[in-house]
Amino acid sequence: DQQVKQNSPSLSVQEGRISILNCDYTNSMFDYFLWYKKYPAEGPTFLISISSIKDKNEDGRFTVFLNKSAKHLSLHIVPSQPGDSAVYFCAARLKAAGNKLTFGGGTRVLVKP
Amino acid sequence: SQTIHQWPATLVQPVGSPLSLECTVEGTSNPNLYWYRQAAGRGLQLLFYSVGIGQISSEVPQNLSASRPQDRQFILSSKKLLLSDSGFYLCAWSMRYTAYFFGPGTRLTVL
């Protein structure tokens, strides 16, 4: 049972344009959502997060939107840069269960110069 | 500042051999610790998590086990590796209400 899904396995975008990554979840008990960026053969690095009581969080070029009624979140990267090419994972936290994170399957982003 | 170490970085093991991967965290006390695995072309799967010394919760029944002999040390083991154990193993830590921070990972290939 996949509780967190990223339905787009890949995304290609032109440098300078906006990248939009989507993530859907099923468990309404998730209280915190995070986005990670991962390069091959490296550990994921934390990008940005959002609490379930908010609907938007912005940090520089990265903005995360949360739609609780739709159980959907998205990550916007603008403007996209070639260094943003990586795999992006969304994750959802269950605070009541050891702070466990459940990850989506990832979306590979390719930013073309 | 906090840092997390994993070793070895890469490992090639024959089927049926034992496994021991180690993870240590510096600069924090009583962290939550986690083992994840990323199989080729797949997402991150939680294997084990620990909220304290000697406290291990298993997420996926399999031939792997985990131990936490010290506050900032987390060990992933197997008595007999299977081909399906190949993957990229990641250790992570968090404090109670923060994001996870991941180690550099161990690439395990079982032949």
Image (cartoon, rainbow, N blue to C red):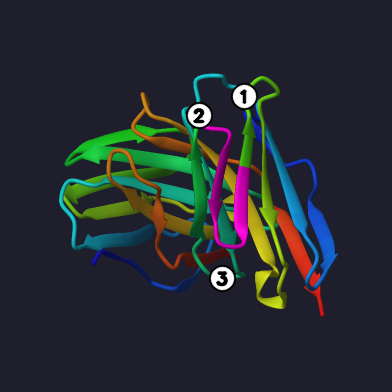
The numbered mark, 1 or 3, whose residue comes first in the sequence reads 3
- Residue A79 to residue B41: above or below: below
Residue B79 is at least partly visible in this image: yes
Q: Is residue A81 left or right of residue A37?
A: right
**Within-10-Å neighbours for mark 3: few <14, some 14–19, many 20+:** few
- The answer to whether residue B59 is magenta is no
Residue B39 is at least partly visible in this image: no
Image mark 3: chain: A
What amino acid type should be assigned to the residue bearing mark 2? Ser
Where is mark 1, residue-wise? A68
The numbered mark, 1 or 2, whose residue comes first in the sequence reads 2
Between residue B50 and residue A87, name the one nearer to us.
A87
**Residue B22, quarter of the rendered image:** bottom left
The numbered mark, 3 or 2, whose residue comes first in the sequence reads 3
Q: Main secondary structure of the magenta part?
A: strand
Residue A96 image offset from top left, x and y in percent: 36, 24
Tell me the residue at 30%/54% (across/down).
B75
Residue A59 image offset from top left, x and y in percent: 53, 56
Q: Which mark is residue A41?
A: 3
Between residue B38 and residue B20, name the one nearer to us.
B38
